[in-house]
Image (cartoon, rainbow, N blue to C red):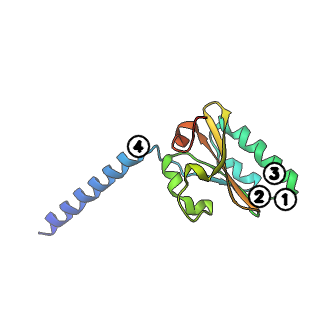
Amino acid sequence: MLLNSIGIFVWMWLRDRSIYRQDTIENNEGEEMIKILRTEDLNKITDKIVFNYISDLLQYLLKTYEVDSIERFGAIFYIEAKIDFAKYKEFCLSAPLLESRFEWIEDIGNGYVNGCVVIDNDTAINLIGKKYLFEKYITED
């Protein structure tokens, strides 16, 4: 009886793990989105293609506002999976993102885009990632 219970438990665990792995592969998960507030946060970005763009943007903001962290007025998020958009509360938003919520989305080259979401008069966030991740939010004019 105990052996049977252990066997069922192991089977259920493996099945759930398999489903989780499949979801992870299908949703292009594997890495967490990266929140960038200060220079040290740049070390978390392993994708060298977008690293320079984010670094330049961060340095511009730090220099312009003469601060060591942009936390007071926003953040830069490096998005690595579509599922990251569901984490809207981490963006300091009260509701899921909609196409209309973006102030603008610009192509920054090499298959990446930068989208800006204005939260209030003093706060905005930049969401940066591969263009296909933003396809739901991009409109062709």
**Residue toward you, 54 or 133:** 133
Tell me the element at label 3: helix
For the residue carrying disc 2, how many other residues have a C-alpha within 10 Å: few (<14), some (14-19), or many (20+)?
many
Tell me the element at label 2: loop
Q: Quadrant of the C terminus?
A: top right
Residue linked to disc 1? 67
User: Compared to 43, does 96 lie above or below?
Assistant: below
Q: Are marks 2 and 4 in contact (CB under 8 Å)?
A: no
Q: Which mark is residue 25?
A: 4
Residue linked to disc 3? 61
Marked residue nearer the N-terminal end (2 or 4): 4
Q: Residue at x 71, y 56 (%)?
A: 124
Residue 51 drawn at (x, y percent): 69, 40
Tell me the element at label 1: loop
Q: Are marks 3 and 2 in contact (CB under 8 Å)?
A: yes
Residue situated furthest top in the rendering = 110
Residue linked to disc 2? 70
Marked residue nearer the N-terminal end (4 or 3): 4
Q: Are marks 1 and 3 in contact (CB under 8 Å)?
A: no
Residue 122 drawn at (x, y percent): 77, 62
Marked residue nearer the N-terminal end (1 or 3): 3
Tell me the element at label 4: helix
**Residue toward you, 136 or 18:** 136
Amino acid residing under circle 3: Leu
Q: Are marks 2 and 1 in contact (CB under 8 Å)?
A: yes
Q: Residue at x 41, y 43 (%)?
A: 25
